[in-house]
Image: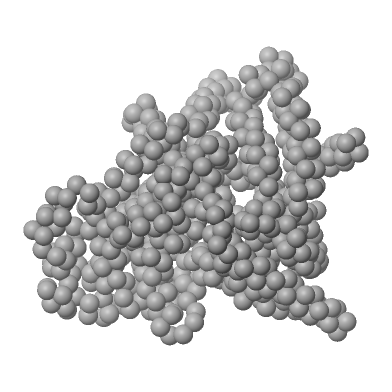
Amino acid sequence: MKKLLCTLLSISLLSAPAAQAIDLGDFDNIDAIMEDNALTDTANRYGSIQLSFFPEFATRLGFESANNKLDQRDPERDAQALRAYNIVEESFSEVERKNLSESKKTEYDILQGRLAYDHWNLNRNRASLDPLHYAEVFDAIYDLRLKQLNYQDLQDRDLTARVNALVSTAEQAQRNLANPPSFLAQIAMEKAYYAYLSFDDVAQYMLSRAQDDVSRNQVRADARAAKKAIKDMFELFKRLAQENQEQDFRLGERNYNFTLNNLYFINAKSRTLEKMLDKNFLTAQQNLANALEAFSLPTDLEEETLLADIHVPGEEMSEEQGVTVSSIEAENLEEQAAITEGTEEEQAPKPAKKEKKKKKNKNEPLVKASAFYNISSRLTEGVKNQNFVAALNKESSNLIKFFIQDDSLPVSGIKFYVKQMPAYYAYMQPYRFMAPFGTQGNPVYDFFLRVPSGNENTRQEMLNRDFNLPTLKLLMAGQLVPGLAYHATYSTPNLSSFRKMYPVPTMQNGWEVYAQHLASERGYIITDEELLFLAWADYVRAAQALVDYNLHTEKFTYGQALAWLTEKHGFDKTQAEGMLKQVASKPAEAVSYIYGYEALKNLRTKYQKKQGKKFSLGDFNSKVMEMGYIPTDRLEAEMENAYKAEKSKLTQALSTPFYMD
């Protein structure tokens, strides 16, 4: 134990960020300074545990010395990590929260939640019961494949080390997994399948970096062994998924609430949260029904040709401008016009009278997902293939200018880049924003986009689904500007090391939703088609959050959840199954989107009322971003602190003679 403690402390000192400068003249705050430093020391010890026991997570914290290892997955490692956490918890218990500065109180709350969640997670025996625990290793490989370091040779060395360690991970899975939930095994099996299909991409990259024939032969041998390990894991997960087991993947109400409280910092009581999610779903249902009304009459068909005129507010179009999201649909004008030539009988939905009859049934939903599918299918036909990577790069630059001129966002020299999605992730998701890892020394902000692939029919289906104009605009707003990419590139350089490493997902997910609605409010998402797709996105989020809650609190079985989505609310079975896989893989995450957005919306409403005409939207948004992703319970206190600090600086500036400035 003493040896372990010495190791942790030494790593802590080496990995600790530079201490903040102390103003020794400020003796009134000396207690807060001392307590802040005590918390920083405890946080560094906590970080050292990640570096020692969880190298995959340590990579995401920015600890590059962990890049050449994969996690050891077995009960013995978990027991060692628990003993290390006990040491940190003893240190943490000595910190007096009331003596901390306002910003450190926030970090205290985050660390307290993380310690509790990590302790609970280690006691769940994931090594024996969770196949996804092993499937995470594939993401860890791509963490290095996508990451950009200052020294390429070190990155190549670390990637090779992780690829070679796949053999050990497969052996651990074979040795440790026993009677896991079959549904989790099914999800892990799919990830292993995609990893196997796309592994040649990694192998080819490693070969391209080899210096001579000897090293190339070694790379080929290592790649064969790693690919076989992936196949072995696939076969194991497949067998476990097919076995008839009674093991339930649902958390249960107690563990679900624990996850809500300590990972997502959602502290609402169960009944209050349930009412909130029910109300949110009904509101989303009503909004979707309202948005669909714009397409209920034949006259709306003539309006589809207006897609050709859509552009970013304030953007001047020119022949030299090239391909932009704004001009993509313009090139499809003939196809869009052709759609409108159908008969009223073919194009119009069912008569309003019949709809009214349905509404009389209290058990019948106000609107079903199938209604959106019917409308959207004709709005998104015939999208042409373009260089979407270049288009989104250009569109993001235009959007930054627009929102800054609109005074919705602060001025900043922000740069991020849109790139093609690697094959492994492309099998599972249409896009992925890659923020810098924690305190990464060479921060790079990349957005990866899945481009259409496969045969002609598959490519066209992907084009229609993922690259129609409303979908692209929602993607731009939520993920790029003013979404996650803008938030990260603006806030990250000024955040403390702790906030860079331990963002709270509730605020991160809430900002994505907030950004889409901000884009609508300020005139970027504005047409009937775009508002319909925004209402649909809200509806899907609301449905998934409600299913997440009801499933993990055991109000729904898996079969009941699937039936609720498909039979009662008209979701396509493939989409419904995908939603349930996300709910099973990341319990409570779906709820965090709703909760985070509501917190931001309520905070903004409060300050708009409080400040009246003095309220500045751009200033408010900049202050929110400068906090980083923090618990929603700390939003108001930190915002008050930010406004007070700003007022204090202004007062000091006005009272200081110009010759002393």
Q: Nearer the viewer, residue 327 or 14?
A: 14
The x, y position of residue 588, in whole percent, is 50, 45
Res. 80 in view: yes
**Which residue is found at the position 29% from the left and 71% from the top?**
377
Q: Which quadrant holds the N terminus?
A: top right
- Image: 38 above or below 430: above
Res. 618 in view: no
The x, y position of residue 194, in whole percent, is 59, 71
The x, y position of residue 602, in whole percent, is 39, 34
Q: Which quadrant holds the C terminus?
A: top right
Q: Residue furthest right?
A: 3
Q: Residue furthest left?
A: 353
**Which residue is found at the position 54% from the left and 70% from the top?**
427
**Which residue is found at the position 25% from the left and 62% from the top?**
371
Q: Is residue 627 left or right of residue 116?
A: left
**Which residue is found at the position 64% from the left and 74% from the top?**
196
Q: Nearer the viewer, residue 47 or 529?
A: 47
